[in-house]
Amino acid sequence: MAIPQQLPIAVRRPNAPLAIVWIVLEQRDRRGAPMVINPTLAYIESQIRAAFGDDWQSFRVIEARDVPTDRTFRDAWRDRDGVIEVDLPAAKALHRAAVDRRAAARIEALERQVVTALVTGAPASRMALLRDRRLALLAARDDARIDAAASVDELAAIDPLASIADD
Amino acid sequence: MATIRSSPSGPLVDAVLAPIASETVLANPESDTALPVGAPSSALLDFLSALPASGDIAVRRAGEWQLEPVNDVVATLLVESPGMPAVFIYSPVNSAPILASYNVAASVDPGAGLRDIIFTRPFASVNYCAIAGVRSATQTTIRSQTTTDVTVGSIRIMSVIENANLGDPTNWYLVAFGDLAPL
């Protein structure tokens, strides 16, 4: 099956990430007969409304190469001055939330280890190690490097949990 | 002469196709384009695939023979063929979003871990069966599910990583079965 021709549209929405709508321009029926779509403004709007109802602000036709391939901070994409780019403050919020989720999962696992250590009468050194790790995980959520990051690349490279050991 | 039924369970299409006139357009008249009663969907699909892209075909409805545009006949058969997918799409998450599709007007990327599929031709009701799938090259704990955002004309599917968080897969898949809305 041939890859269908598509027209990408960037759609701005209130209080939501930038959406990319890929409109299919050429389809084929069961018998391979082509069905060509004329992407009029009315047709484009009808597809956007099918996805979002009236919950959108504006759209513009873009090219496939305009769509970022790095989706690390996908929900921070913004369409500014004809360029789709990552909004750094929004990316920092996403990054912090991701660190929070990972830290919470590790703290939960750590607390199970603490219970095990208590039940089995682990030495004080083991208890101290677990306590220090827990404090480090809690502190990682507020890693100042996230706020200080000056670029998206710099932000992506920050992993506050990387230096905290695990069993 | 052939009788087409789109399901073994009943005469969903009361149509008989036959080369009744020299101008009748059939894809393969020399070997007769016969379909047995209760032919499986795959046979129906083969039959439809072999038909010409335009022209007329002989159809008998309610005992009356007539020539009808082959596109209309096919469209009718598709509406009434629940054994064949009404929608399918295979889409990587990134820059070439749709690699294969049928009955898809648009694929919408509203954010990480979400995909809205807009149908070219809607279903007759929201009671259709949609099966979503995802594949990830990096995540081992990833699954897909449809959401409550289901309408006759679109559906939202999502990709969940580690059982809780929305996250992008490497590929999206959707297949849906059900009655399409009449033309």
Image (cartoon, rainbow, N blue to C red):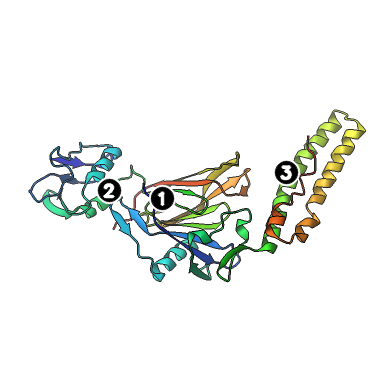
**Residue at image coords 76%, 60%:** A147
Give neighbour class at mark 1: few <14, some 14-19, many 20+ (Cα, 10 Å): few
- Name the chain letter of the residue that bears numbered label 3: A
Q: Position of residue B138 (x, y in %)?
A: 60, 42
Q: x and y percent of residue B96 in the render? A: 47, 53
Q: Secondary structure at mark 3?
A: helix
Q: CA distance from mark 1 to mark 3?
A: 38 Å
**Where residue B127 is drawn, which disc sits there?**
1
Q: Amino acid at mark 3?
A: Ala
In the image, residue B158 lies at what x, y percent?
54, 50
- Residue placed at 71% from the left, 49% from the top? A101
Residue at the spot of label 2: A31
Residue B119: quadrant of the picture: bottom left
- Furthest-top residue in this view: A120
Amino acid on which the number 1 mark rests in the picture: Asn
Q: Locate the C terminus of chain A and report the quarter of the image it occupies.
A: top right
Q: Residue B164, can we see it?
A: yes
Which of B128/A30 is in front? A30
Where A8 sits versus B11, above or below?
Answer: below
Q: Does B46 sit above or below residue A72?
A: above
Residue drawn 44% across the image and 52% down it: B98
Q: To which residue does mark 3 refer?
A: A105
Q: How many labels sit on residues? A: 3
